[in-house]
């Protein structure tokens, strides 16, 4: 194995331009325009998140027209997302948040390079180079300066084959979890109908009549630990600490951030920060935790967020919205179904965790 500077083997390292800077608007149909959010964390394209531009705009952005087997590497925001350009997304273009890396086919296996760019050795390198506060970024020069470990072509193919197999199994497990979640949602609709129109005619009350909501409390930095009691912030578990704020089952709603409105049900002691809202008290015994959790997820509180600055929601919409109140016997039937499904999810999740640990170990072994 030897290490080479990426800039010494790449023929092109460049980036695109936002069409609006040239006076063009995005269109409903046309040439695919790939953004950072168009690439998943594991390097798959998400066509539903492509934007589109006209052919005329594409020609004006000729420098960033994508070619087969180009490597895309995000250099702003979610740094490090990597994907290989495939025939099925072409013709396509991209903006300045994605670096385009073009390497001759006889120099390195493209899939091998993709895994290298996702590896701990590259993560360490861009973590040292990233700049910015509101929007983290690295430069094209930083990309060119990446030290890339290179093995012989046969070894590269063996590594790629092993990593592909593990990655495919990881993808399969995630699909299984998604299908189980869909099954739970389908059962909810089967039992309770469309909550938005209360098609089954259940009793209904305002949130303020049912719950007492409260914001969490700020947790000083010196109390933030790597293990202990989970600390929930605006996007789920942020840290751990040594004490709890809540020691009873409740539902936590993200208050601030890109995922505000997200729902987490907890049954063990937790700390909740001021970036989240939680149900401090249920004024009635109208709900099972499982039913209320899914109902709140379907109600999609994110749509009520204020986007004038950092996305955030207040307690007001939670209190003024109408909540259906099905008979507790029907909720118990749903809860039993959820509990059975959760057992299947736990088995799949345990398998997924082992596979992700295996992939992480292989990436460390191969690329350092």
Image (spheres, rainbow, N blue to C red):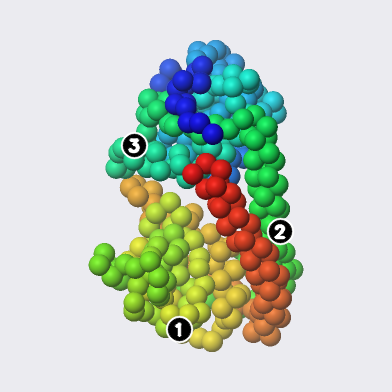
Q: Which mark is in front, 3 or 2?
A: 3
Q: Quadrant of residue 305?
A: bottom left
Q: Residues within 10 Å of mark 1 (few under 14, many from 20)?
A: few
Q: Nearer the viewer, residue 132 or 193?
A: 132
Residue visible at 52% across and 41% down? 367
Residue pointed to by mark 1: 248
Q: Position of residue 65 (x, y in %)?
A: 56, 19
Q: Position of residue 57 (x, y in %)?
A: 53, 16
Compared to residue 185, the image places residue 78 above or below, namely above
Q: Position of residue 9 (x, y in %)?
A: 51, 21
Mark 1: secondary structure: loop
Residue visible at 45% across and 70% down? 252
Separation (CA) of disc 3 from disc 2: 37 Å
- Kindly check if marks 1 and 3 are in contact, taking CB atoms under 8 A apart as contact: no
Tell me which label, 3 or 2, sits earlier in the chain: 3
Mark 2: secondary structure: helix
Q: Which mark is in front, 1 or 3?
A: 3
Residue visible at 56% across and 71% down? 293
Mark 3: secondary structure: helix
Q: Nearer the viewer, residue 218 or 122?
A: 122
**Label at residue 159:** none
**Label at residue 176:** 2
**Label at residue 129:** 3
Q: Position of residue 310 (x, y in %)?
A: 35, 50
Question: Taking the image as drawn, is residue 193 in sight?
Answer: no
Q: Quadrant of residue 279?
A: bottom left
Q: Nearer the viewer, residue 214 or 341?
A: 341
Q: Which mark is in front, 1 or 2?
A: 2
């Amino acid at each position: 194995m030897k290490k080479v500077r990426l800039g010494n083997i790449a023929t092109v390292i460049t980036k695109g331009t936002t069409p609006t800077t040239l006076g063009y608007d995005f269109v409903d149909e046309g040439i695919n325009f790939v953004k950072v959010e168009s690439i998943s964390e594991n390097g798959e394209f998400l066509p539903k998140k492509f934007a589109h531009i006209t052919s005329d705009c594409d020609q004006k952005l000729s420098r960033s027209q994508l070619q087969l087997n180009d490597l895309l590497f995000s250099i702003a925001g979610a740094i490090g997302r990597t994907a290989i350009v495939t025939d099925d997304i072409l013709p396509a273009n991209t903006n300045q948040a994605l670096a385009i890396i073009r390497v001759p086919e006889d120099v390195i296996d493209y899939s091998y390079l993709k895994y290298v760019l996702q590896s701990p050795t590259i993560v360490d390198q861009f973590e040292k180079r990233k700049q910015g506060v509101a929007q983290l970024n690295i430069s094209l020069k930083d990309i060119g300066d990446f030290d890339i470990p290179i093995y012989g072509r046969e070894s590269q193919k063996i590594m790629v084959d092993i990593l592909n197999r593990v990655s495919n199994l990881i993808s399969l497990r995630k699909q299984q979890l998604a299908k189980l979640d869909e099954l739970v949602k389908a059962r909810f609709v089967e039992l309770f109908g469309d909550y938005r129109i209360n098609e089954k005619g259940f009793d209904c009350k305002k949130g303020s009549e049912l719950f007492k909501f409260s914001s969490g409390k700020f947790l000083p930095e010196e109390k933030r630990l790597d293990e202990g009691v989970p600390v929930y912030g605006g996007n789920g578990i942020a840290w751990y600490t040594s004490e709890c704020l809540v020691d009873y089952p409740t539902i936590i709603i993200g208050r601030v951030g890109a995922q505000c409105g997200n729902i987490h049900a907890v049954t063990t002691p937790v700390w909740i920060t001021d970036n989240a809202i939680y149900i401090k008290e249920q004024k009635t015994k109208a709900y099972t935790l499982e039913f209320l959790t899914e109902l709140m997820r379907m109600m999609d509180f994110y749509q009520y967020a204020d986007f004038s600055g950092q996305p955030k929601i207040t307690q007001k919409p939670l209190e003024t919205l109408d909540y259906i109140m099905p008979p507790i016997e029907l909720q118990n039937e749903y809860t039993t179904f959820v509990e059975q499904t959760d057992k299947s999810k736990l088995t799949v999740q345990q398998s997924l965790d082992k596979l992700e640990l295996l992939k992480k170990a292989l990436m460390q072994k191969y690329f350092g």
